[in-house]
Amino acid sequence: MKSSRSNAVTGESLEKTPNETSSRAIPHQTPYDGIDDAETNDRKYSDHGFSRNDRNDMHRMGKVQELKGTHCRWTISLGLRVCSTAAPAILKLFDRYGLTISSAYARNQYCTGWMSALSWQAGQASGPFLVGTIIQALLTVNDTSYEPKGWQGTLFVFAVVLLIFALNVWGANAMPYINNILFFVHIFGFLAMIITLWVRSPHNTAGLVFTQFSNEGGWNSIGLSLMVGQISAIYGLICSDGAAHISEEIQNAGLTVARTMVWSYVLNGTLGLVLLITFLFCITSVDDALNDPSEYPFLYVFRNAVSQPGLNALSVLLLILVFAGTVSFNISTSRQTWAFARDRGLPFSAWIAHVHPRLHLPVNAIALSCIITSVLALINIGSNVAFNAIISLNLVSLMLTYFTSIGCVLVRRVRHPALLPPSRWSLGHWGIPINVGGMAYALFAFFWCFWPNATPVDAASFNWAVVLFLTVAIVSLGYYEIKGKKVFKGPVVLVQE
């Protein structure tokens, strides 16, 4: 039995099929583009920072463009950046916080949204913390009398956060050009680092690098130690959906975002593998590297290869790229939070979802993300364990949201393929196997994310991710029952057949 509903965006009367789950009317919003729906001039669309295809995709999700197309023509993903992408099928089937549009379970949608939004907020805190502690490590290397303190690292975090806020609000128009410059810095910096280490650093033998294994965690076998130790590698490759959160600000997003995802992952995965192998050859003593006074093994490698000025130069180059990644992380995190708030998924959603009328940016969401990072940095003064526990929530929650979102696409692809909107970039016949593989690996990684790094386990070495994960799940379910189910309005699907 079909029911009729009206689309407030176009005024059309649409028929609701049994497979559609949302019957709400889309509230009127003032679009950034300011172009009438009947407008068909492609040049006119382009001049406003989006294409006609972008407008169609937004219409399919029941949305209008509210943010400025700052990144419309200059989307390049960097190796140590998070601005990678998501496939167009996800762009068309999901709003940017990872919720399933066509799922009949609003509670699952809501909890997934909370997991995704909070995991990005937790992960964002790691960037400024990393920048601040690297600066402290460089001070230690250059001045042996300097003793780093936790409160000093927190002050560095505050300074980094202020700079991030300034760049992402008042420097937003320049960010695409800065990104492109940093792309070349990334490539040439990588070459400079690799060449320097291969020419100047002492090396291990190939046999030692590729055939010698060590179990430093006290586990029963090398295989188990390998499974637990892979989490660090996974962390270096997460957030591949970063650009999906700024898709509203990218011109021709349905095609550009997908291409960027593929090529950024291939490029950065290759460069990361080369860099990893290089460092394995250059770490001539694992114990000395782990016990380096700077607490950063890469500084031990640089010290063995070059003089003090050379060490500073290579470290500053790396620091710039890490900072650039932190800026991009804030862009994606703030848009993630803003999108969830736009659908009333968070407390104080009206304030968080506000778009600055002149800048056309989610300034409040950017400010909130910076505030959360600063508050988490205060925890580091009292306890590194507590801070690292909060950061660990990032990886666990992302694996769950990846599993959920890919699974929903897979179910729809298998059970109701005709209801999938046509995509301009597709995996073709490889789509189902890749979706199955992605789900399997996300579930596999999710399981290992809860394991501690070593045994025996105490309060300092315990992996508190399981506690935080369950806490977020309980809080999100509780808030949904108290208020969320009354106000939460997830995205809708408008399937044109």
Image (cartoon, rainbow, N blue to C red):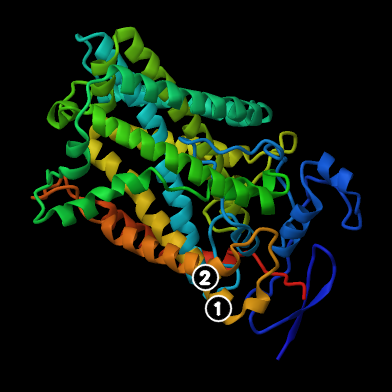
Q: Residue furthest bottom?
A: 1
Image quadrant holding the N terminus, namely: bottom right
Q: Amino acid at mark 1?
A: Val
Compared to 78, does 453 lie above or below?
below
Q: Does residue 281 appear left or right of residue 325 in this picture?
A: left
- Give me the residue at 55% from left, 58% from top: 345
Q: Nearer the viewer, mark 1 or mark 2?
A: 2
Q: Pinpoint residue 51: horizontal percent, then vertical percent.
A: 79, 49
Q: Pinpoint residue 405: horizontal percent, then vertical percent.
A: 50, 64
Q: Pinpoint residue 50: horizontal percent, then vertical percent.
A: 77, 46
Compared to 432, does 248 lie above or below?
above
Compared to 114, does 173 lie above or below?
above
Q: Does residue 261 appear left or right of residue 279 in this picture?
A: right
Q: Does residue 222 appear left or right of residue 340 in this picture?
A: left
Image quadrant holding the C terminus, namely: bottom right
Earlier in the chain: of badge 1 and badge 2, it is: 1
Whether the residues at callouts 1 and 2 have beta carbons within 8 Å, the answer is: yes
Q: Pinpoint residue 20: horizontal percent, then vertical percent.
A: 65, 77
- Dot 2 corresponds to which residue? 432
Kind of element beneath mark 2? helix
| Residue 170 in which image quadrant | top right
- Dot 1 corresponds to which residue? 414
Q: Amino acid at mark 2?
A: Ile
- Residue 104 seen from this side: no
**CA distance separating discs 1 and 2:** 8 Å
User: Camera-side residue: 88 or 11?
Assistant: 88
Callout 1 crowding tier (Cα within 10 Å): few <14, some 14–19, many ≥20: few
| Residue 233 in which image quadrant | top left
